[in-house]
Image (tube, rainbow, N blue to C red):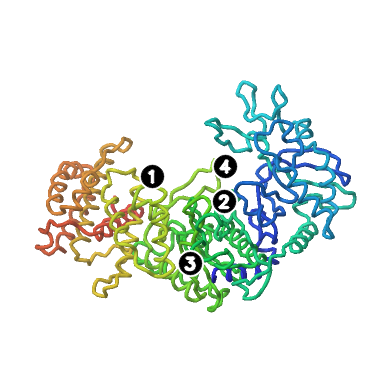
């Protein structure tokens, strides 16, 4: 029950802090749920209809009972704001395709309006609802539409022109194989115009919310032992849904199924398994929904959220490094021309910047601050489970986050929105960054990977970030294999995979459990490294560069074909020695061309080839066994060194 306790403490710490609330993400008061409203109805204090209009995807908090907040099907009305199927007394009269639940809605609304906790706006809505002319009024003002037989339409024919707003808002559902849009599914919300009352919207009136909370607590008579508070209190029989989004039907706690096997065989009653107080349940679920919408990372039904119980801002662990700091000051090698050479500083400047960033948070997050991370996923549409849960101290959390970004950093091909354009185009930039779990999954299995595999991969990577575990070997191997198959990918995708593969290989060896195999690779080109795999990677990069420059020199404006190094990269990774001889022979025509067009460049490249060859041990050079991922590090570092030289005109 620890997660409930932490979420409850979060609610208590943050509910009165308006600075943490946004229009899209607010902590709901107890006894309320959030839903998207479609139709805005305005009436006066006497229940007289004034006007109605269509809303544009407005999420509103609305009063709800335990049953209605967790309803997935069946009859469970909200007390004030609900669908036309519930609020429209004349819904059946106009041929509604669903069963009308107006009587239960009117009973609940009347109970509240006639109680000591009534509110003048509730009474106004009750007066109007009793007239049973909601659908008629909405048809007369052009919000709902009927056919020639005065029956509510379930679709809008193309031959009748522009589709009305209500049909653009409602979701199509399959009924007997036919897609229909039931106008009874539209959710109506009320505004009451009363002279002298500045707040006409019922969903924004605090006094109305408090009146409902008091009424709800007065109605709940089920008392029992709450396992969270450790005392007797009003017990929740049902728990809220809609944790990840407004249409989410899955629940974390569900034990009300007395006909299935939820608790049968162990207990005779559901409360014997575990009982949670009504207020506690609503506050914890409200906290979780608020945190997910505010700072959670969602991947379909899977959601992860990390937060400080005090409500303080913390760096999010599932983001890439460059997203941690201000986008206006990106950490790229082009940002300051006079800055140090990042291809040669071996990542010291990155480490320094990351340490400063973490230290900045360490000033606001105390060492004993409670940091929690929770991961959710649903096996079925109605059931959700916690797939990951971890509590850390503030100091521990910051150290592990810093370790992940330091161990897994490599040059990454990234994109961001252009600030000076209105067409939302993106620009490409390179930055030192640890890849996000989502990018690692796509690099390991491709852009079109299955959703289940993507979720499983992200789930496996979260412990690497939060617990300091080693990157899974199969993920690293898969990234290296896909990167070696260069010809099978678009150039941008291959560049992206290259950065991820190098990052994982580096992280894997830094965190290797065997101290003898533990090694930290530099992000700068190591010209003294004599490792066979690293040197073969450098040779491949040099061959690629020579052929690319020769093709460009012969035809600067033409389309160049893939180089031999490009085409033979997979084979080179499997049989480096024999494949290198093939690549070397294929370079001869291009080197002859460069002899006349770029003699100085060719001289430099020949000298570089000789230097790299000289670093080989003869037995290593003749060894034709498969290369490890280390060759990608040598290849990438050599390519970046060429880019740096080209930018400075050293290879002209």
| Residue at image coords 55%, 43% | 421
Say which residue label 4 marks: 422
Q: CA distance from mark 4 to mark 2?
A: 34 Å
Mark earlier in primary sequence (2, 1): 2
Q: Residues within 10 Å of mark 3 (few under 14, many from 20)?
A: some
Say which residue label 2 marks: 248
Mark earlier in primary sequence (3, 1): 3
Can you say which quadrant of the picture contains the N terminus?
bottom right
Mark earlier in primary sequence (1, 4): 4
Find residue 644 and report its horizontal and vertical position in percent: 34, 56
Q: Residues within 10 Å of mark 2 (few under 14, many from 20)?
A: some
Find residue 491 and report its horizontal and vertical position in percent: 34, 44
| Residue at image coords 63%, 38% | 169
Say which residue label 3 marks: 389
Q: Is residue 549 left or right of residue 207?
A: left
Mark 1: which secondary structure?
loop
**In front here: 47 or 457?**
47
Find residue 119 and report its horizontal and vertical position in percent: 83, 55
Asked if labels 4 and 3 touch by Cβ distance under 8 angstroms, the answer is no
Q: Is residue 595 left or right of residue 647?
A: left
Q: Nearer the viewer, mark 3 or mark 4?
A: 3
Q: CA distance from mark 2 to mark 1?
A: 25 Å
């Amino acid at each position: 029950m620890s997660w409930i306790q932490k979420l409850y403490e979060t609610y208590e710490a943050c509910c009165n802090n308006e600075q943490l609330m946004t229009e899209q993400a607010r902590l709901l008061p107890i006894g309320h749920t959030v839903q998207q409203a479609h139709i805005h109805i305005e009436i006066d204090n006497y229940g007289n209809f004034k006007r109605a209009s269509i809303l544009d995807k407005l999420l509103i908090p609305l009063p709800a009972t335990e049953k209605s907040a967790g309803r997935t099907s069946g009859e469970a009305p909200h007390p004030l704001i609900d669908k036309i199927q519930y609020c429209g007394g004349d819904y059946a009269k106009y041929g509604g395709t669903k069963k009308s639940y107006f009587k239960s809605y009117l009973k609940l609304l009347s109970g509240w309006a006639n109680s000591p906790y009534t509110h003048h706006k509730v009474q106004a809505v009750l007066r109007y609802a009793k007239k049973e002319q909601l659908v008629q009024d909405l048809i007369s003002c052009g919000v709902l539409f009927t056919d020639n037989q005065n029956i509510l339409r379930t679709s809008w024919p193309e031959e009748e022109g522009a589709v009305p707003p209500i049909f653009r808002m409602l979701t199509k559902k399959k009924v007997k194989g036919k897609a229909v849009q039931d106008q009874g599914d539209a959710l109506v919300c009320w505004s009451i115009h009363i002279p002298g009352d500045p707040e006409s919207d019922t969903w924004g009136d605090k006094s109305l919310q408090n009146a409902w909370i008091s009424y709800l607590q007065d109605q709940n008579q089920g008392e029992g032992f709450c396992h969270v508070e450790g005392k007797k209190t009003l017990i929740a029989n049902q728990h809220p849904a809609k944790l990840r989004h407004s249409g989410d039907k899955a629940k974390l706690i569900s034990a009300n199924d007395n006909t299935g096997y939820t608790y049968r065989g162990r207990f005779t009653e559901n409360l014997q398994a575990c009982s949670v107080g009504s207020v506690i349940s609503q506050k914890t679920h409200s906290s979780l929904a608020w945190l997910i919408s505010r700072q959670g990372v969602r991947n379909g039904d899977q959601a992860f959220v990390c937060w400080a119980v005090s409500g303080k801002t913390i760096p999010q662990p599932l983001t890439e490094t460059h997203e941690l700091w201000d986008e206006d000051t990106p950490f790229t090698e082009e940002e300051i021309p006079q800055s140090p050479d990042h291809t040669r500083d071996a990542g010291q400047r990155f480490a320094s910047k990351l340490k400063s960033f973490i230290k900045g948070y360490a000033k606001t997050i105390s060492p004993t601050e409670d940091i929690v991370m929770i991961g959710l996923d649903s096996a079925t549409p109605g059931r959700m489970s916690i797939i990951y849960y971890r509590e850390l101290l503030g100091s521990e959390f910051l150290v592990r986050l810093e370790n992940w970004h330091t161990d897994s950093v490599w040059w990454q091909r990234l994109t961001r929105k252009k600030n000076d354009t209105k067409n939302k185009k993106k620009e490409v930039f390179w930055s030192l960054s640890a890849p996000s779990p989502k990018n690692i999954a796509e690099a390991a299995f491709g852009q079109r990977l299955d959703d289940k595999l993507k979720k499983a991969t992200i789930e496996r990577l979260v412990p690497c970030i939060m617990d300091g575990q080693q990157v899974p070997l199969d993920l690293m191997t898969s990234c290296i294999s896909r990167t070696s198959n260069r010809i099978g990918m678009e150039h941008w995708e291959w560049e992206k995979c290259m950065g991820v593969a190098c990052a994982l290989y580096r992280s894997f060896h830094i965190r290797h459990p065997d101290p003898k195999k533990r090694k930290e690779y530099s992000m700068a080109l190591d010209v003294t490294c004599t490792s066979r795999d690293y040197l073969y990677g450098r040779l491949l990069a040099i061959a690629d560069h020579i052929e690319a420059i020769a093709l460009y020199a012969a035809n600067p404006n033409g389309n160049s074909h893939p180089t031999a190094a490009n085409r033979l990269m997979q084979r080179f990774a499997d049989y480096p020695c024999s494949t290198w001889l093939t690549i070397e022979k294929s370079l001869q025509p291009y080197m002859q061309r460069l002899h006349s067009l770029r003699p100085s460049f060719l001289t430099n490249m020949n000298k570089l080839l000789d230097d790299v060859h000289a670093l080989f041990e003869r037995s290593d050079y003749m060894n034709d066994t498969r290369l490890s991922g280390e060759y990608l590090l040598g290849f990438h570092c050599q390519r970046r060194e060429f880019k740096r030289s080209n930018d400075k005109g050293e290879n002209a």
